[in-house]
Amino acid sequence: MAGVLNIRLNWMRFMYAYNIGGAGIVGLITLFAPNFAAQYVFSGTTVPSIAMSILGSIWFAVGVLSVFGLFHPLQFSPMFLIQLVYKSVWLLFIALPALFTGNEGSIPLVMIILFVFWVVGLPFAIPFRYLFNLQATQGVAR
């Protein structure tokens, strides 16, 4: 039991670190160099500046909160649930239709690949029993 919990906590920490490096840095770039982000992060996509600034703010916030998640993985794990839902929704309703209708050039392939990695990896990091109180939380590593 303790070994499984340690593996889960290590995977959670890996995902937090990945958030810091991915979402945090991309968020900063999107906020402070939106033209660079539109060209290189979003494959030349033209995004209204207000949408780009909101996205950059959210991704930067995910990066900042992930720093705290490294030290308190369980307490910050609801962020993973939010990421799982929004990335799944984006893949299902934006990316997949674009791929099936031949408009895949409108969506950065790198983003699709990264989001698929997240959607596949997050269920292993999310402590569902802890979040939904499906087991006694006493004795859970803090």
Image: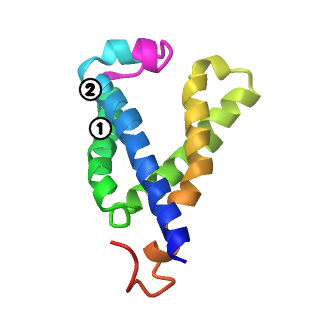
Q: Position of residue 91 (x, y in %)?
A: 61, 40
Could you say which is closer to the camera, residue 42 or residue 133? 133
Range shown magenta: 38-50
Q: Residue at coordinates 40% horizontally, 83% vertically from top-left? A: 137
Q: Residue at coordinates 37% horizontally, 18% vertically from top-left? A: 37
Q: Is residue 43 visible?
A: yes
Q: Residue at coordinates 74% horizontally, 21% vertically from top-left? A: 102
Quadrant in which residue 110 is drawn:
top right
- How many neighbours does mark 2 have within 10 angstroms: few (below 14), some (14-19), or many (20 or more)? many
Outermost residue on the left side: it is: 32
Q: Amino acid at mark 2?
A: Leu
Q: Is residue 142 above or below residue 85?
A: below
- Looking at the image, tell me whether mark 2 or mark 1 is earlier in sequence order: 2
Q: Position of residue 123 (x, y in %)?
A: 58, 58
Q: Position of residue 140 (x, y in %)?
A: 40, 78
Secondary structure of residue under mark 1:
helix
Outermost residue on the front side: it is: 3
Name the image quarter holding the N terminus.
bottom right
Let me know if residue 100 is in the magenta part: no
Secondary structure of residue under mark 2:
helix
